[in-house]
Image (spheres, helix red, strand yellow):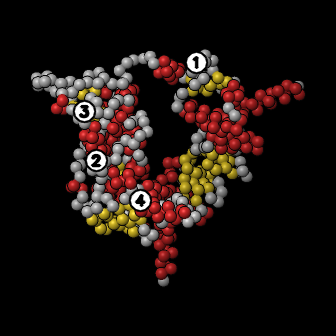
């Protein structure tokens, strides 16, 4: 019997997706279903929060890359 | 149309005979739209369609010309000295409308220009824009929807503002139907003619004064009875209003005002990201200031540069790179157009009015920021049979609601569930019936 589930489908590179999974691992309250390498189903009301967290994580990593390249 | 006078519901099979086999997709999409507009009702099993009663009655009346009168307004005569000419009305409407647009981008005004502009946008209009999410209330900055709004044609802008207005009035409990009928009445009025306010109802009068703020009508309230000569209230619809129901341009070109330069384009963008805009309009300059780093201003020219920080700050407001590029190419200076024309004759991409390097860089800046893509919708999973899964996938694709599917896992993601859900129920019913028949034969 088919079931339908409400949520936000997030599509991203495998690397970005890995970061999302990592964020989720902290509190376990974002992801509904881990579909494949590039797609995850996320709770609709949590999506904006996830985006902000991802943004922060990315900024940290990008800065590190820049630092290392300048040295 | 054929359903209008038909006494019986129309069956799915009959409908199929009307259309070519190749256009089933369009049929499904059309039915879906009509259902969502509450124009038709779908009865399951056997599948038939019929029109909703209200729609049927109103359309019949409209076609046969019956119904109540007054639907084209009541003209009224105005004392000679108070009469307004068409150019006057145009100028007034444009002034009001630009004031609204300017308020939307106003927070980005370059210092020194803001005082030059009459900020006569009233409190009420501002509240309206905030409520419609075109402007962010907290820091009074423009939003994505707001920027999209700016890029539209004036006619579309007027309509979206009216829709916002009606929604907010509805929330405060006013009679929207009367207001709507008044707006449609405006659309069919003559430009440059005065109309009497006396046949209007209370709620329509309040709408009238709001429309006055928007520049859609010029309203003169009735003079006090003691004054001589006592005139009844009257109003002039402006071009903004009379073009509501047509597709001609709402604000005609006029060399005396600044927005007109938008009509023929005023922006030159060079391959080194430098941008020159031949304009003196504060409105246009502040729109540019949303996504460019402006540094010099001359009487008829501003120059600036597209930088990573200026673009990302625009992106942070929710303005997309495609919106920016579209704005730049729509308002490109004739010289840029002619240059791209030459390029086109040399077998280069026709679409690139803007320098390709700049276009690429702007989109790259956006991609860098937006690394994830999210769609709200529904994940459908746990299909029992491959055939069922495939049928549902096909149906979702036909309806244009399918976002992505995973064949290996028998999952699909759709943006809307209503029709797909119905379809799945029908499939299930069919299967149950078949199962019964098979069981009967076996028994």
Instruction: Give whichever of discs 4 and 3 has the lower sequence position.
Output: 3
The 10 Å Cα crowd at callout 1, few under 14, some 14 to 19, many 20 or more, is few
Q: Is residue B423 above or below residue B397?
A: above
* Residue under label 4: B334
* Residue under label 2: B99
Instruction: Give whichever of discs 2 and 1 has the lower sequence position.
Output: 1
Q: Is residue B139 above or below residue B240?
A: below
Tell me, yes or no, whether dots 3 and 2 are on the same chain.
yes
Disc marking residue B219: 3
* Image quarter of the C terminus of chain B: top right
The 10 Å Cα crowd at callout 2, few under 14, some 14 to 19, many 20 or more, is many
User: Left or right: B244 with respect to B440?
Assistant: left
Tell me, yes or no, whether dots 4 and 3 are on the same chain.
yes
Tell me, yes or no, whether dots 2 and 4 are on the same chain.
yes
Q: Quadrant of residue B184?
A: top left
Figure disc tally: 4
Q: Are marks 2 and 1 in contact (CB under 8 Å)?
A: no
> Do we see residue B370 in this rendering?
yes
Whole-angstrom CA distance, mark 3 to mark 1, is 43 Å
């Amino acid at each position: 019997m088919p079931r339908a589930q409400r949520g936000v489908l997030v599509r991203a590179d495998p690397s970005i997706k890995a970061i999302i999974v990592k964020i989720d691992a902290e509190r376990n309250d974002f992801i509904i279903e881990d579909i494949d390498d590039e797609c995850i189903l996320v709770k609709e009301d949590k999506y904006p929060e996830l985006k902000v967290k991802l943004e922060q994580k990315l900024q940290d990593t990008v800065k590190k890359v820049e630092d290392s390249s300048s040295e | 149309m054929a359903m209008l006078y038909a006494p019986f519901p129309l069956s799915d099979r009959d409908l199929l005979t009307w259309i070519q086999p190749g256009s089933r997709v369009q049929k499904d999409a059309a039915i879906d739209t009509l259902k969502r507009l509450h124009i038709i009702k779908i009865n399951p099993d056997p599948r038939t369609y019929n029109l909703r009663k209200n729609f049927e009655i109103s359309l019949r009346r409209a076609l046969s010309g019956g119904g109540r009168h007054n639907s084209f307004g009541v003209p009224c005569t105005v004392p000679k000295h108070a009469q307004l000419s068409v150019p006057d009305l145009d100028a007034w409407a444009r002034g009001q409308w630009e004031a609204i647009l300017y308020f939307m981008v106003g927070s980005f005004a370059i210092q020194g220009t803001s005082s030059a502009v009459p900020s006569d946008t009233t409190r009420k209009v501002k509240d309206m824009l905030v409520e419609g999410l075109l402007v962010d209330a907290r820091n009074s900055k423009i939003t994505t929807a707001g920027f999209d709004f700016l890029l539209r044609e004036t006619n579309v802008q007027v309509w979206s503002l009216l829709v916002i207005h009606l929604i907010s009035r509805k929330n405060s409990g006013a009679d929207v139907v009367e207001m709507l009928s008044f707006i449609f009445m405006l659309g069919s009025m003559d430009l440059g003619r005065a109309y009497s306010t006396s046949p209007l109802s209370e709620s329509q009068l309040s709408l009238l004064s709001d429309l006055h703020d928007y520049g859609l009508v010029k309203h003169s309230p009735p003079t006090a009875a003691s004054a001589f000569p006592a005139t009844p209230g009257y109003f002039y619809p402006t071009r903004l209003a009379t073009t509501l129901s047509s597709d001609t341009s709402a604000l005609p070109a006029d060399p005396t005002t600044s927005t007109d330069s938008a009509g023929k384009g005023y922006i030159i963008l060079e391959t080194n990201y430098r941008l020159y805009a031949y304009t003196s309009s504060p409105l246009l300059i502040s729109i540019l200031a949303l996504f460019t780093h402006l540094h010099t201003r001359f009487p008829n020219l501003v120059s600036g540069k597209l930088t990573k920080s200026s673009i990302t700050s625009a992106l942070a407001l929710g303005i997309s790179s495609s919106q920016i590029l579209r704005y730049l190419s729509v308002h490109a200076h004739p010289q840029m157009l002619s240059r791209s024309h030459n390029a086109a004759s040399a077998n280069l991409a026709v679409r690139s009015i803007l320098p390709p390097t700049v276009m690429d860089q702007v989109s790259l800046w956006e991609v860098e920021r937006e690394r994830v893509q999210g769609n709200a919708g529904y994940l459908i999973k746990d299909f029992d049979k491959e055939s069922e899964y495939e049928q549902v996938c096909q149906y979702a694709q036909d309806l244009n609601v399918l976002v992505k599917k995973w064949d290996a896992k028998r999952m699909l993601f759709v943006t809307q569930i209503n029709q797909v859900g119905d379809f799945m129920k029908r499939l299930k019913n069919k299967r149950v019936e078949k199962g019964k028949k098979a069981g009967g034969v076996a028994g």
